[in-house]
Image (tube, rainbow, N blue to C red):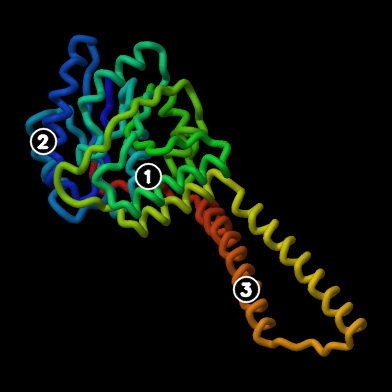
Amino acid sequence: MLSVIVPCYNEEENVVPFYEELTEHTAFLKEKGVELEIWYIDDGSLDRTVEQVRTLRERDERVHLLSFSRNFGKEAAMYAGLENARGDYLVIMDADLQDPPSLLPEMFAYLEEGYDSVATRRVSRKGEPPVRSFFARLFYRLMKKISRTEIMDGARDYRLMTRKVAASVLSLGEYNRFSKGIFGWVGFRTKWLEYENVQRARGETKWSFWKLFLYSLDGMTAFSTAPLMIASVVGVLFCLLAFLMILFIIVRKLCFGDPVSGWPSLVCIILMTSGVQFFCTGILGQYLAKAYLEIKRRPIYLVKEKF
């Protein structure tokens, strides 16, 4: 069985078109003796997403719904889908058709060749705002340098995997999830499939620049301790600089009898060092906040409805 996991948040316009295109491009499964099930994971939608899925269910019993009690985020939706799907093979896809179902036959063929998972990455960001594309590339370059986990530039959540890979991902039950990093961390033999960027079929993206920025911070703190090291190094450097300045002032006073003057420069130095201190404290606060949320052991999601 192949389980298709579809996280949804206010996607009423895309539920049916996605289903139609998916079923069209998964007709090849019947020849291989593979069944299909579709899990729409409703992430607390405020529109008619759930009603649209119910309508599909009346037409096709392969359609299933898991609806959250509120919005828990896409990461929670993907985890819930992997946890509830029954398939021997599982694939995560967006409902907005930015993850082309037409790639599924090729992806399935790679699994038959012996790969454990097939991941996708965009080779272009055509249609995206230039500022968002610039910072996205900057994020991936930075992650490659500060993290030991493989996170490919342009990587999508669109990924076909075996049950073994899914079980490994589920074994990482952390509350603060960054799936792109988790998939890289668990490893396994992965084939990367490249394709041109596809724009949303209908509706508007739910990912604002601010949400993407916060998501990138989650990724950095989840899979790298480099920011903590940076804070430590900056602290040491400023201590050395302060020590050298004290020596300079003492020598200047003994040799030239010059009074210590220049309060404007002193104020600038104090402001700069205070800013660095707050910056380093902020980094520590990010890691402390993640640890605080983890030790609460709250569930990753709560179910309102399931069928």
In the displayed structure, does residue 297 sit left or right of residue 68? right
Q: Left of 144 or right of it: where is 271?
A: right
Image location (x, y in percent) of residue 49: 16, 47
Compared across the picture, whether 298 is left or right of 85 comes to right
- Image quarter in which the C terminus is found: top left
Q: Is residue 307 visible?
A: no
For mark 3, does the 10 Å Cα neighbourhood hold few (<14), some (14 to 19), or many (20 or more) residues?
A: few
Q: Earlier in the sequence, mark 3 or mark 2?
A: 2
Q: Determine which residue is flagged by label 3.
A: 272
- Is disc 1 in contact with disc 2, using a CB cutoff of under 8 Å? no
Circle 1 crowding by C-alpha within 10 Å: few under 14, some 14–19, many from 20: some
The mark tally for this picture is: 3
Amino acid type at circle 3 is Met
Q: Is residue 153 left or right of residue 202?
A: right
Q: Residue at x 36, y 56 (%)?
A: 211
In the image, residue 223 lies at what x, y percent?
54, 43
Q: Is residue 253 above or below residue 139?
A: below
